[in-house]
Image (cartoon, rainbow, N blue to C red):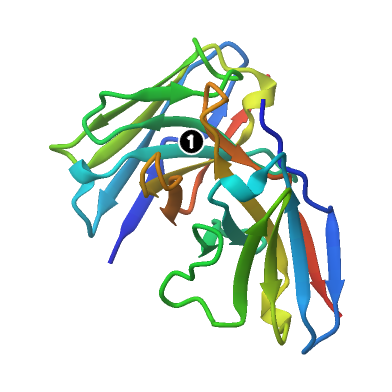
Amino acid sequence: SYELTQPLSVSVALGQTARITCGGNNIGSKNVHWYQQKPGQAPVLVIYRDSNRPSGIPERFSGSNSGNTATLTISRAQAGDEADYYCQVWDSSTAWHVVFGGGTKLTVL
Amino acid sequence: EVQLVESGGGLVKPGGSLRLSCAASGFTFSSYSMNWVRQAPGKGLEWVSSISSSSSYIYYADSVKGRFTISRDNAKNSLYLQMNSLRAEDTAVYYCAREEGTVTTGPYDDYWGQGTLVTVSS
C-alpha cells in the first residue's frame, strides 16, 4: 500500500517561512492536496493538485511537488496558521485509493 | 453556499449499529462523489468510504469493509453511512466531504461538514 510520511511537528518564528514536507515513493507523479485543521474544527482544503489555492486561501500558502517529496510552504507565518496539516493523494495501486499523511503540527513561535 | 451537516452520532455499545446522515445544500448534490472520513481522538484523518455521484462506484477502507455501508439519496440531497458490528476502534469524529476532481487529476475534498462524534463503549 502507498504511504505518505510527514514530520510530526514543525516550528516557525512569527513572520518567517514554514515548510512542511510529505514524502512518498515517486510522489512527484501524483497530485498532492493539503488540508489545514485547527483544534475542534473540520479540515479545510488549502492546496489542491500540488500548487493550486482554493478561493479564500491567502497567497502565503503555496505548494510544490517533485521526486519523492511534496512541500507545503507558508510564508510570513501568522499565529492563526498554527494548526495540523495533512497531505493527501489518490493512489490507484491501493484498493481504497485515498491516502492521507499522518499530519504535521505547525507551531508558530 | 455549500453546506454539509452530519447527524446520527452518539454512544453505542460494541457490536451495535448506528446510521450517520449528511444533509447537503448549496450545490448540485447529484453531480458529486462524496466521502466519509473519520478522525479518532487525538489521531489523524482516515478515509472511510467513497461513493460516486450515481452510486455506481463504492469503495471502503479495509478497516470497515463488510461492516459499514455507504449510500446516498440524490432526491433528498443526503449521504448515509450505516455502521454495523461497531468496535471500540471505530470511535471517532465522522466527517462527510464533497469530492472534487477526477481519477485522472486526483480527487480531493473541497468541502467538509463539521463532523459527528461516534463513541463505541460499553
Q: As drawn, is A74 to the left or to the right of A7?
A: left
A90 vs B67, nearest the viewer: A90
Dot 1: chain letter? B
Residue B24, given in percent of the width and then of the height, sits at 28, 49
Quadrant of the rendered image containing residue B111: bottom left
Question: Residue lying furthest left in this view?
Answer: B75
* Few, some or many residues within 10 Å of mark 1 (<14, 14–19, 20+): some
Residue A56, given in percent of the width and then of the height, sits at 44, 77
Looking at the figure, which quarter contains the N terminus of chain A? top right
What is the secondary structure assignment of the residue under circle 1?
Answer: loop
Quadrant of the rendered image containing residue B91: top right
Looking at the figure, which quarter contains the C terminus of chain A? bottom right
Looking at the rendered structure, the kind of residue marked 1 is Gly
A56 vs B8, nearest the viewer: A56
Residue B64, given in percent of the width and then of the height, sits at 55, 19
Q: As drawn, is B50 to the left or to the right of B48?
A: left
* Residue A103 visible, this orientation: no
What's the residue at 76%, 56% (across, down)?
A104
What's the residue at 42%, 48% (across, down)?
B105
Total labels drawn: 1
What's the residue at 70%, 60% (across, down)?
A84
- In the displayed structure, B92 sits above or below B55; it is below
- In the displayed structure, B35 sits above or below A56; it is above
What's the residue at 48%, 54% (across, down)?
B114
Residue A55, given in percent of the width and then of the height, sits at 41, 74
* Residue A70 visible, this orientation: yes
B12 vs B5, nearest the viewer: B5
Q: As drawn, is B28 to the left or to the right of B57?
A: left
Name the residue beneath numbered marker 1.
Answer: B9
A21 vs B50, nearest the viewer: A21
